[in-house]
Image (cartoon, rainbow, N blue to C red):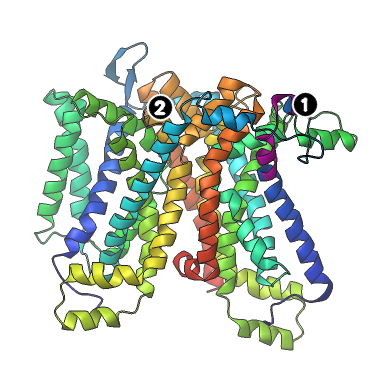
Amino acid sequence: MTTRNDPIKHFFIWPALIIVLVISIFPLVYSLTTSFMSMRLVPPMPARFVGFGNYADLLQNPRFWHVAGTTTLIAFISVGLQYVIGLSVALALNSRVPGEGIFRVSFLLPMLVAPVAVALIARQVLNPTMGPLNELMSALGFPNLPFLTQTSWALGSIIAVEVWQWTPFVILMLLAGLQTLPDDVYEAAALENATPWQQFRDITFPMLLPISVAVVFIRLIESYKIIDTVFVMTGGGPGISTETLTLFAYQEGFKKFNLGYTSALSFLFLIVITVIGLVYLAILKPYLEKHK
Amino acid sequence: MSVRTLKGKRRWIALGGCLVWLAITFFPLYWVLITSFKTPIAVVGGPTYLPFVDFEPSLTAWRELLSGQRGQFFNTFLASTIIGLSASVLATGIGAMAAYALVRFTFRFRLLSALIFIVIAFGGFLLGRNALGFGQGISLIYAFIAALALAVLSSRFRLPGPELGNNDIVFWFVSQRMFPPIVAAFALYLMYTEMGKLGFKLVDSYIGLTFAYIAFSLPIVIWLMRDFFEALPVEVEEAAMVDNVPTWRIFFGIVLPMSKPGLIATFMITLAFVWNEFLFALFLTNSRWQTLPILVAGQNSQRGDEWWAISAAALVAIIPMMVMAGLLSRLMRSGLLLGAIK
């Protein structure tokens, strides 16, 4: 039955196929060919084939390495924190803390707020004179903290906002995963007098590993694309210290109209993401297989 | 009462942790809400926390916003709503059809056909642009049509090489989400500009942005709906097939009504994605079809520290999604979304 054959299947799949092909293959063809050319709109310059010139320029540009490093830092730290907090909250919710129903609904909210709006709220909360956080800090005896104007604080603020916004996604997915774990294993563990920590280490965590790997993978890839939060919160500043890959590409492409360079940059970005994804999966594969 | 329910002290520690996270979740939302009801003087005077207690609420910000003093809010809201709703309805519909086909039918093609497509698409574009002297837009269109036609044609012959099936198609769809959107957004902007030179206005147009959003929502729709259709009992459809009901009527008359919860959940997830999306809107629109995130982001640079107005603007973008979250959570509680996420 599942291998029904009916020509109508083509009418079902082709609309989706055509749309995704058009929107993905056009840009791919266009930017890959452009990335091997020197092409500028402002000031206008005739297109000229430069081979790997754009790529070489980029790889020698310290700004590229800086931006890639900043993006990696933001992505890894924020996803790590999201996972730790998300797992703790999901475990608590799954073991029926009082008021679990209310928590479940309200914990989802940040995920649905537009990142741009989140960044604007963060700017108010972190404002040096009008924001509540600095007042709290002064009350606790700290000096007025430069949340958005000093590099390390600005990076920390961006990471905090990312954690605030995306931990709900981790909670949602891990909770769904936790609910599929069978009860009988835990009953057996309870009979053996296993401590809660042993249960977590030997049952919950290993059985949750496949979905954890997937969640972290999705979040890592998505975090690498970060632009809107940074765009509004710091604009990449101070200087270029919080600039991310997407923001850098936007500046080069849309402000300077340096087409060949931007195309090459976006392909390097694609390569970076692919490499990170593959390395991540390769590192975790033995663990996944061990627990199957 | 499950074995996994916490007991004693641990239960209260867990509750404490949840309450802390709840406070962290709600404080920023609370803050933006009360700031939108503050007067300019109250905002500049330093942080205040409780309406009626340490500041007098006022409607200044909202009145300014609704009277249009703060930019074209009404138009932008309308544009966001139209694009959001139509892109998510279409993406859910088209994606559900594709997901159904991928669950219930078998597709087979050779890897070679896919390679033919890619090679012709690239080769044709370069040939048209550099050798034949067509414009970029025309070359892209010709190359695409030729590549698609030859790839489909080639699949009619028995080609050598590995064979690909349904799972590979699903993987291809889902992998589109891995793509950094900047690659597509920037190239799409240039492509739309080329099309504009040919007479089709796509930059800052309804069709251009909606089309891009449909394409970028399809992977997630197909992923979610495929899991959903796989969980449906196949017997009903088999019974209908015995009665010789045509496939399209099985799909629209039986399958879609049965999967209403999944469709609603998928629609809402897509809507939230499109509503909040920033990068494509930034590249592909400039005035007429600008969406709310762009307008809200612009508030900051245009107005400086006028937080009362910025808060009201941010809330206009936030509130519709909050309402939707309420609906979504109802679905969640009835366990519907669980099946769709797993």
Q: Nearer the viewer, mark 1 or mark 2?
A: 1
Whether residue B270 sits left or right of residue B104 in the image: it is right
Q: Is residue B242 above or below residue B124?
A: below
Q: In this orientation, which residue lies closer to the viewer: A104 or A257?
A: A104
Whether residue A247 sits left or right of residue A201 in the image: it is left
- Pinpoint residue B235: horizontal percent, then vertical percent: 29, 83
Q: Is residue A79 above or below residue B169?
A: above
Q: In this orientation, which residue lies closer to the viewer: B140 or A209?
A: B140
Say the numbered circle drawn on residue B184.
Answer: none
Circles 1 and 2 on the same chain: yes
Q: Mark 1 falls on what kind of element?
A: loop
Q: Residues within 10 Å of mark 2 (few under 14, many from 20)?
A: many
- Pinpoint residue B99: horizontal percent, then vertical percent: 31, 62
Q: Main secondary structure of the magenta part?
A: helix
Most extreme residue toward the right is A141
Q: Which quadrant is home to the N terminus of chain B?
A: bottom right
Q: Which residues are magenta?
A: B30-42
> What is the chain identity of the residue bearing mark 1?
A
Say the numbered circle drawn on residue A262.
Answer: 2
Q: Mark 2 falls on what kind of element?
A: helix
Q: Quadrant of residue A264?
A: top left
- Is residue A106 part of the magenta span, yes or no? no
Say the numbered circle drawn on residue A129.
Answer: 1
| Three-letter amino acid code of the residue under disc 2 | Thr
Q: Residue at left 33%, top 41%?
A: B210
Whether residue A43 sits left or right of residue B111 in the image: it is right
